[in-house]
Image (cartoon, rainbow, N blue to C red):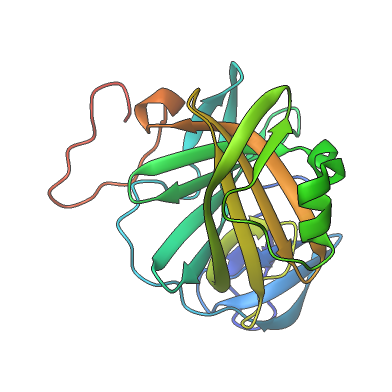
Amino acid sequence: MANCPTCGAGVPARGDGLPYATCAYCRTLLMRHGLTLEAVGTVAQLPVDVSPIQIGTRFSVDGAESTSVGRVRWGWSGGSWNEWLLIAADGSRHWLGEAMGMYMLTAEYPDALDIPAIRNFAQGNPMAVDASVKAGGQWFHVADIKEAACLGSEGDLPFPTLPGWTITSVDFRNDAGAALSVQRGRDGTSAWLGVWSDLAGLAPKGLRMLEGWAIPGGMA
């Protein structure tokens, strides 16, 4: 464990090879250089939400256990959502999107960037609201398109989360419960393929206690 150069608090390394961390005490964004930490800015204070997920919550992903090591909170004109970074023991990464009790579990799928509609979007053009695309052998249709801004972060992440970061996010889905998420922002465009799920379907362990909410059996 290294110490925050701003406040001196301990900053654990939760994700192997992740270059950025947010100090839980003073909100300083830190860049790792081996065993030392460099302050590179200040992260916005995360808004209060009622997510039962927290840093350290464990999930069953593809038959293996993955642990949440970081979170980004995004806001848009109609509300906000969380994106949790999950890392397994073998280093594989997934993102878990969380909004209004719905969960989207995805892994990076760069092949989607070759799809004409998504390639056109990556070039800075708008995505058609009625667009349909085929990815991973499945057809998807646009579920929503949002302009969003980073509201803050916590834990360890692969990118900096300073105020002012904005993205255009397009979510696709189909009737089989599959999900495709495409995000265009400061560092280009990325695509993520996976599934929609309820919380129980992810077999979580180590959930946060919420007042007035009893953790269902088997999910503690």
Up the image or down, 218 lies above or below 209; here it is above
In the rendered image, the residue lying farthest to the top is: 63
Seen in the image, is 79 located left or right of residue 105?
left
Say which residue appears at 34% left-offset and 46% top-offset.
Answer: 52
Say which residue appears at 66% left-offset and 76% top-offset.
Answer: 165
Pick whichever, 173 or 141, lies toward us: 141
Residue 178 figure quarter:
top right
Up the image or down, 106 lies above or below 98; here it is above
Up the image or down, 22 lies above or below 5; here it is above
Residue 78 figure quarter:
bottom left
Quadrant containing the C terminus in the rendered view: top left
Quadrant containing the N terminus in the rendered view: bottom right
Residue 81 figure quarter:
bottom left
Residue 114 visible, this orientation: yes
x then y, percent, for residue 183? 68, 57
x then y, percent, for residue 103? 45, 40
Say which residue appears at 70% left-offset and 79% top-offset.
Answer: 5
x then y, percent, for residue 143? 50, 47
Residue 18 visible, this orientation: no
x then y, percent, for residue 100? 33, 51
In the rendered image, the residue lying farthest to the left is: 212
**How many discs appear?**
0
Up the image or down, 196 lies above or below 155; here it is above
Seen in the image, is 159 located left or right of residue 151?
right
Say which residue appears at 67% left-offset and 69% top-offset.
Answer: 3
